[in-house]
Image (cartoon, rainbow, N blue to C red):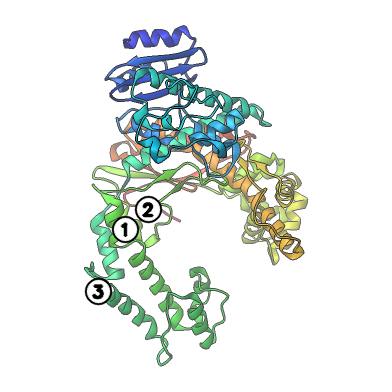
Amino acid sequence: MTVDEVLAWLRARGVKRGDRVGLAVDAAAGLGLATSAGAVAVATTDAFGFIAAINENVGPRWVWWSAADARVLVTRGLVIDRCWDVLVVHRLLHGGWRTSIPIAWSAVRGLDADTAPTLGQLDLLGAPADEGSDLEDPVRPDGHIKPEWLEPAWRNSADRLAAWAAVTHQAAEAQASLLRQRPMPERALSTAHSESAAELLCVELERDGLPFDEIEARRIIGEAAGPPTSSYEEEDEQRAVRDALVFAAIAPLQPVNLRNPTEVKDLLRRLGIDLPDTRAWRLEQARDLHPIIDALLVWRKSERIATTYGYRWLEEHVSDGRLRGAWSSSDGSAGRMTASAGLHNLPSVMRPTIAADPDYVFVRADLGQIEPRVLAAVSGDPAFIAATHHDDLYQPVADRLKVSREVAKLAVLGAMYGATTGESAHALRGLQQSYPVAMGFLEEAAASGSAKQDILTVGGRLVRMSGGTSTDGDIDAARTAAASRSRYARNAVIQGAAAEFFKVWAILVRSRARAFGASVVLCLHDELLVHAPASNADEVSAVVGDAIGEAAHYWSPTPEVRFLADISVIQRWSEAKG
C-alpha cells in the first residue's frame, strides 16, 4: 500500500483527528494499524515515513502498549502529540505500579493474570505451538495473550503487526469503556490522554537528557570528596580525612562510626545533646548547641557527594554533556513523575552543574502554592477559592483566622497532611469553621482511608487503601495503621490531583514550546525546566505562563481557582530562587 492508500483506508473508516488507532511497527517488516472497523497490514521499509504522513494528515491518537513502543518512534525523531499508553492507563484504572502486557490484557478481559502463560526454556528453542490455536492469532483459545507474541522478533511480518495492533486497540477500547464508568467519565478519559502524553514526555526526557557541565561537577566533587581514586585503599583514606574533621570537634572523646546513626546519637548524648534522630533538618535546629553540629552538617554534605554524586555517578549517568536517567510518569501511588540517576534528588550544592548550552537559557517555572490551590479546585469551597485570587494564598486565610501567616500555612498544610499540632492545631479548628467544604472534603478522604476503602483522585486515578499488613487483633496496631491510612488518603487526593494538573501543564508546554526550538528537560514535583534558545527566551516564558491558564481550563473542576507560577530565565539551575 502507498501512503495515500493508507490515508484513504483510515478516512473510509471515519478516523478523525484524536481518534484512537492501534499501532505496531517493525522497521524491516512495516506497520500494522487498527481501528474499531478493522486492521490493515502495510508492508514497507519506510514505516516511520508512513507514520509521519498519517500524523500530519490525520493526527490520530496512537495506541500502543507501553513506553517501549513509544521509544521506537522517539528514537527515530518522530514528534507525536496524542497517544494512549495501555500500561499507563492500566495503572490509572487499577492503582499501584505492577503491570505488564499480560496483566493489562487480563484486566480488560476479566481473566486471572496469575494464570497467564509464560515462555519456558524449551519454548525459546523453537516455535511454540498452542494446540488448537492459530499461530497468526495473538490470543490463545483461553483468552490470554500468547507469550511468544510479547517478543518483538515474533512480530516479523506486516500481517502479524496488524494482528498485534488489533489486540492493542481492543485493550484501549475496553479501558475507555471502564473509564466511562468513573464518577466523572470525561475527566477520567482526559486524564488517560494526559497521563499517556506524560509518559511519552518521559521517553523524550530520557533521550535528550539534562544539559550538564561536567567540568563544574568535577570541581564540586573534588572539593567535597578529593581527587578520583584508583583503589579501595585510596577511598578509605579519603573517608578518613572527611571523618577527621568531625573528630577534631570532639577531642578527646573516642571516635565513632559516623555512618551509623545510632552511634552518632550516642555521641551527641555524651555531649549533652539529646536528639530523636540525626536528620539534616534536625541538626540544623541544634546548630548553636555545640561545634560538632556544624562539623556533622559539613560532613553529611561531603559524604553524600562522595558516595552518591561522585565520580562513579558521573561515569554511569553523564555523557555528551547530558545527565540522563530513567523516567516514569507515575510513582504508582498518587501519580507523581519520578526519575532515577538522582534527577529528583540532586543536592543544592550540585545545581550549578545543570547549565544551559551556549546561546541557550533555561526558562524555569515553579507552581506557587499548588497543593492548597488544588484543594480549592477539587473541593469547590467558595471561601477557599476566593483566597486563591491572591498571590499569597496564606495571607487571606491568616486574616480570616486572625493568626499569623506562618501559623495559617502550617494549619493548611497540616490539614492536607494530617499532621497539625501546637498553635496550628487551634488554627485548624478555625479552618474547619471558615472553610467547611474544603475541610469536609479532606475528612471524607481520611475516613475512606481509615476504613480501607480505595479512593479516586479528581482525575479518576485509583489509589489503593485496601490491603496492607495484618494487625491480627492487635488493637493498638490497628489504630496506628488506620491513622496512617487516614493521613495518606487525605494527602493522596490532593497530591494526586496536583500531579495530574502538573502533567497537563507540562505536556502543554512540551507542545507549545516546540515552535520556538525549546524543550522540557526536567520535571521536578511542581517545577519545570525548559531549555530554550536565548533569542526566544521571552516567547518561551510567555508560553510557560499561558500554559498554566490553559491547563487550569482543561483540568480544574472549578474554573474560578487561580493558579500561578514563578517564572525566571536563568543560565544555571543554581540561579533559581527558592
- Distance from the alpha carbon under mark 2 to that under mark 3: 25 Å
Quadrant in which the C terminus appears: bottom left
- Distance from the alpha carbon under mark 3 to that under mark 1: 18 Å
Compared to residue 189, the image places residue 336 above or below, namely below
* Res 489 label: none
Q: Nearer the viewer, residue 170 or 568?
A: 170
Which numbered disc flags the more N-terminal residue, 2 or 1?
A: 1
Whether residue 549 is visible to the viewer of this picture, yes or no, is no
* Residue type, mark 2 in image: Ala
Q: Position of residue 46 (x, y in %)?
A: 28, 20
* Residue type, mark 1 in image: Trp
Residue bearing the label numbered 3: 234
Q: Residue at point 76% right, 61% down?
A: 473
Q: For this view, does 127 lie left or right of residue 170? A: left
Q: Residue furthest bottom?
A: 252
Q: Residue at point 25% right, 74% down?
A: 234
Q: For this view, does 18 lie left or right of residue 435? A: left
Q: For this view, does 182 lie left or right of residue 517? A: right
Which numbered disc flags the more N-terminal residue, 2 or 3?
A: 3
* Res 313 label: 1
- Distance from the alpha carbon under mark 2 to that under mark 1: 8 Å
* Residue type, mark 3 in image: Glu
Query: Secondary structure under badge 3?
Result: helix
Quick check: marks 2 and 1 in contact, CB under 8 Å?
yes
* Res 341 label: 2
Q: Residue at point 74% right, 64% down?
A: 474
Quadrant in which the N terminus appears: top left
Query: Secondary structure under badge 1?
Result: helix
Q: Position of residue 331 (x, y in %)?
A: 51, 47
